[in-house]
Image (cartoon, rainbow, N blue to C red):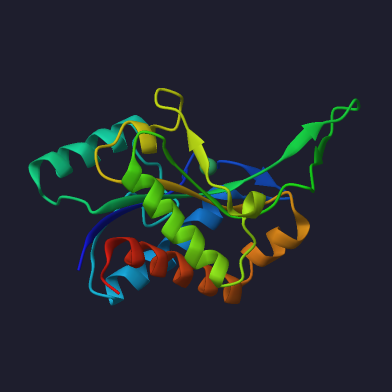
Amino acid sequence: MATFCTDAGHGGRDPGASWNGVLEKDLTLEYTLDINDLLLRRGHTLLTTRNSDSNVPSLSTRCKLINTHHQQGSPRFDAIISIHCNVAAYKSTSGQYVANQSARGFFGVYSRSSIRGRDLAQSIANSVSNAGVVLKNGGKMSTVELGRSLAWIHQTLPTAVLLELGFLTHPEELALLRDPAYRKKLTRAIVDGIEGFIGVT
Ligand SMILES: [Zn+2]
């Protein structure tokens, strides 16, 4: 069994992305709670950054807390996972935001300096793809260079991945992301991918 920290992106005063009245912070919480439930039922140890629509400490503070736990071994994390949703839109000449509907699909972001981060992201992406979920760019993983934004993967000591579940601006994907059956399928595939990386399956 393993020890994880999960993070439902945004929350409280910070809605994250939004589209057609759907807020990223609400979807990330629903998905993270389901992931947490499954990880606990499979016997893993879990810390999570929020269990409700609450304000949380800043991302850099959360990262420092995770690092303190990790360094002190109380607990030491096998992996940390942050959950997000995406939007792709541009501002038209009339000032309205228009969806770029060519953008869709699940992807994982990891630090280029972390081989284990890459392996965790790849294991999750493979599992999600096998479950029939569309991957962004046919599954080509994103990498973000060290020192450029995304504190979750660059300022943390444990193996870290940030998962973008899909695009709120893609009508079909938005409907899927809000569908409980799809959520069940996707969260199960994510947890299977995490366990595949840890090697407990
Ligand atoms: Zn986000």
Give the farthest residue toward the top.
147
Left of 147 or right of it: where is 85?
right
Question: Total number of numbered labels?
Answer: 0
- Residue drawn at x 40%, y 42% is 55
Quarter occupied by the N terminus = bottom left
In the displayed structure, would residue 76 be above or below residue 60? below
Residue at 70% x, 60% y is: 173
Above or below for 53 versus 179: above
Please identify the quadrant where the C terminus is shown.
bottom left
Q: Can the viewer see residue 140?
A: yes
Residue 160 showing in the rendered view: no
Q: Nearer the viewer, residue 95 or 106?
A: 106
Looking at the picture, tell me which residue is in the foreground, 131 or 83.
131
* Quarter of the figure with residue 32: bottom left
For residue 109, side relative to residue 22 (left or right): left
Give the image quarter of residue 190. bottom left
Compared to residue 18, the image places residue 127 above or below, namely below
- Spot occupied by residue 160 in the image (x, y as percentages of width and height): 34, 45
Residue 36, image x, y percentages: 35, 65
Q: Position of residue 59 (x, y in %)?
A: 37, 34
Q: Is residue 7 left or right of residue 75?
A: right
- Residue 67 location in percent, x, y? 21, 37
At x 36%, y 32%, the residue is 154
Q: What residue lies at 32% left-to-right and 31% top-to-bottom?
A: 155
Q: Residue furthest right?
A: 94
